[in-house]
Image (cartoon, rainbow, N blue to C red):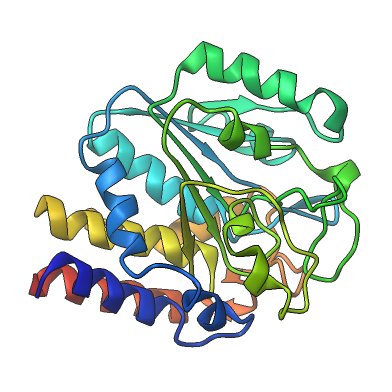
Amino acid sequence: MNHLHISQQIEDVLTARNPRGMKTLQAALSPGYYYRAAKMLQNISGHVLIGTGFPVINTYETDGPVGAIALYRAVEALGATPVLVCGAPLADAISSDYRVHKITVGEPATSAQEAQLVIDRYQPSLVISIERPGMAADGHYYNMRGENISERCASFDYFLTLANCPTIGIGDGGNEIGMGNVADTLTGLNIIPSATCCDELLIADVSNWAAHGLLTMLSVISETDMLEGWDNLAVLQYLSDRGSVDGVTRENTLTEDGLHADISEELIQNLRKIINKH
């Protein structure tokens, strides 16, 4: 089986549940998007900026940071230098354990300038956004309920639009950075969509799953299991201990978008079967 077919297999697995219409969006994307994104990572060097952290009430949700930490771990294993870019309170919660660049919350007027300063500092070779609110056409940020959350958002959009390197956007609903790539298709979903684009958009029923899917594809092309040793439940517990909540239920539980940890564990094991097979 060639890499395009393996990528399509991963793409189908990650949208099979379809709670928020990602199967519809899949038809708008050119097949092989996990393969193309994995190629961006294959020979990576230098700094990789990974933006994450979706605000929920006065904290952050589990979906996004779990996948960001998985990507961080893989980028380090590849010999590059990952930096998690996020706002408070997530930045403060994890800065003692990871390289974190903290960005300002609720200051859209200066967010482009801030992004340019950070880009100039790190000169990234790749920028990844996973489950980051994307700016809507009206310049504001909205959650899945259509609530304006701009005052609680740190803007990561300009990191992708100003970067002089490849960019990957990951989302699961339509209001995340990168979804501008499929703007026409998003009109059919019950969401105030993001207008921000990226070079390669990855979709999944849960954004964390897209990170695992990307690492699955990377494992196949690099012939190394990038998911080996990954403990999803332990990372959920780590974040829970630091105040995370489920983005759907808004409760401090070891769940992702309302789904029990066992569902993610089963998905990861199925992805590892793809790795082992190929």
Establish if 135 lies above or below 94: below
Which residue is more in the foreground, 82 or 46? 46
Locate residue 119, reporting x and y percent: 55, 20
Q: Foreground: 101 or 240?
A: 101
* Count of numbered circles in the view: 0
Q: Position of residue 41 (x, y in %)?
A: 29, 42
Q: Is residue 172 above or below residue 57?
A: below
Closer-to-camera residue (191/259): 191
Is 212 on the left or on the right of 274, as rendered? right
For the question of whether residue 119 can be seen, the reply is yes
Looking at the image, which residue is at 87% across and 27% down? Answer: 109
- Res 187 quadrant in image: bottom right
* Residue at 59%, 49% in the rendered image: 197
Quarter the N terminus occupies: bottom left
- Where in the figure is residue 60, as x and y percent of width and height? 71, 52
From the viewer's perspective, tell me whether residue 94 is left or right of residue 200: right
Q: Based on the displayed image, in which of its 4 quarters is residue 112 positioned? A: top right
**Against 167, is 59 above or below?**
below
Residue located at (55% from left, 75% from top): 25
Task: Report whether 40 appears left or right of 25.
Answer: left
> Residue 89 placed where, x, y %?
74, 39
- Quadrant (top left, top right, bottom left, bottom right) of the C terminus: bottom left
- Can residue 225 be seen in this snapshot? no
Q: 269 left or right of 196?
A: left
